[in-house]
Amino acid sequence: MKIKSKLNQIIKSALDSANIETKEDITISDATKPEFGDYQFNGAMKLAKSLKRNPREIALDIIEHIDTTTLISKVEVAGAGFINISIDNGWLSKELTKIIDDSRVGVGIVEDKKRIVIDYSSPNMAKEMHVGHLRSTIIGDTVATLFEFLGHTVIRQNHIGDWGTQFGMLIAYLEELGEENKRQNLQNLEQFYRDAKVRFDESPEFADRAREYVVKIQQGDAHCLKLWREFIDISLGHCEEVYSKLGVKLRKEDVRAESFYNPMLPKVIDTLREKGLLVESNGAKCVFLDSDTPLIVQKSDGGYLYATTDLAGLEFRAKELKADRISYVVDVRQSEHFRQIFAIAKRADMVPSDVKLEHIAFGTMMDRSGKPFKTRDGGTVKLIELLDEAILRAKETIKDRDSYSNSEDLDRVAEVIGIGAIKYADLSINRESNYIFSWDKMLSFDGNTALYIQYAYARISSILRRYNRELNGNIAIGDELEHRLALMILKFEDTLLKASENGYPHIITSYLYDLVTLFMKFYENNPILKDNIDTETQISRLLLSKLTANTIKKGLEILGIEVVERI
């Protein structure tokens, strides 16, 4: 339910009826305290200067023309000219009753559908995924799922580096191992890389062969390409194991590797030259923007750089994939790089001016000391090992809380909770911030954690199981807590739309935390299954609880987190 857009229309109609002209955007905001109503409009303050009138007088004029026959129950002017707006309980009851069995919990499909390309995860092909890949993978998949749920067409892209000098070394070593040993040796990609590097450094003959293989790959040699593809496939298999455990929707067909863009790179240079943007500096080809620091697109030896590939990728995504919006979920440290290539792509007409280009930047996951997350000996933490540890710790946290029917049931619940804890901890903070990784915090039943949210869902499931009868009837809002809970449920669509504007998943987690906290207050103060309440009130409260559970489940689903019926 887009309540804010409905209120915007009502306010605009009131302004027209009051003969108040404005070019200002009409913005309705949530009230900061319950005593201020449900929403606030501060437009009178903005209008005061242009109209040369007292803002309170303008506000009083506006409320005289506000329609209070349907959505709104009360409006009043507060302070210097704020308009406090309260939503009608009858309207809330009617709207909630409509969506009791709606699989989308009242969230509509956007009218202005976009075609969105989102680039995320981008693992290294010569190494197993480590914690450094976690944030891009989780944030990217959540934002992509959010876009899809709202009705946009989403094209996931997993950009992998598979085209460079190192691959000659790797496939030469792969061939040297022979069929019998290659699979076993590739179980540990880091060790495989180290062993290949030792051979490269110690054997001039091997090093020469590796260099020859680089050229042969680039020339399309069938034998070398076969080995190269085999190495890439095995490397991607390691990634797919992580994606499966994380519940991430990336698939092999979403991979668009560096090698794919390689044939397009000469055209990038030609385009930049034709547009008069190319400058030669010490033999290298560069583009200067608004600073003295150039973006190098071709080295003096003729080699290309990441920037060249990214420009080719932008043009392909805009013109071939027909994107309206291109999103890159990449470390915040790459902000300047993306600022430059976005500007160049637009200036060179590689990307139409109306295509939105955005860098969905994120900070670093830190340990308790505030340093980047590492193993005790300073090495990188393999992502699959971190996920396995999360499941084990979740199992210890919950094993004594419920009587699980068997060990498989406990293992399944532990996996849902462990993976959910890792993902929610990451998504619950502003993505641009660094955050401290803490097992104790993320597996806590208190605070803004996945476990707190999942436990609320399990509690509501328990209530509905105990009622154990067909649930038919209407929702009738009876008191202030029920009013606030009802309104919170109907704010779900506005929350998702806000989160989708610039790709901020923490807006969704904050909403879920507020929803659950409000439900817990409602549950403590409003009896549901006790004998001393009338049937109509009981049915209404049960339906309100059911809708809360449905909203929690859908919100977590968008975040890529499952729910469980018992904890």
Image (cartoon, rainbow, N blue to C red):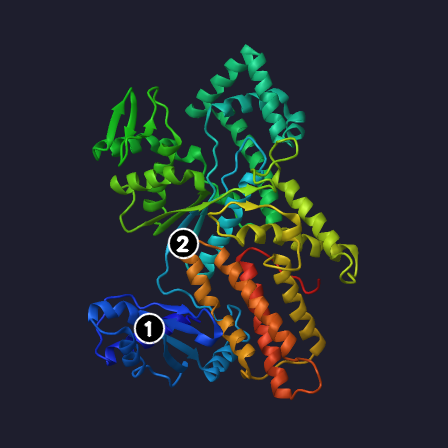
Q: Where's residue 533, x and y in %? A: 66, 87
Q: Where's residue 331, x and y in %? A: 46, 41
Q: Quadrant of the C terminus?
A: bottom right
Q: Which residue is mark 2?
A: 502
Question: To which quarter of the image does residue 529 belong?
Answer: bottom right
Task: Say if residue 554 shows up in the picture.
Answer: no
Nearer to us in this view, 432 or 241: 432
Q: Which residue is mark 1?
A: 80
Badge number at residue 468: none
Task: Say if residue 154 shows up in the picture.
Answer: yes
- In the rendered view, would you say 282 is above or below 110? above
Residue sticking out furthest to the bottom: 534
Secondary structure at badge 2 equals helix
Residue found 47% across the figure and 23% down from its top: 165
Q: Quadrant of the N terminus?
A: bottom left
Are discs 1 and 2 less than 8 Å apart at CB?
no
Q: Where's residue 421, x and y in %? A: 62, 53
Q: Where's residue 139, x and y in %? A: 50, 49
Left or right of residue 81: residue 165 = right
Q: Amino acid at mark 2?
A: Asn
**Sequence-first tag of 1 and 2:** 1
Q: Amino acid at mark 1?
A: Ala
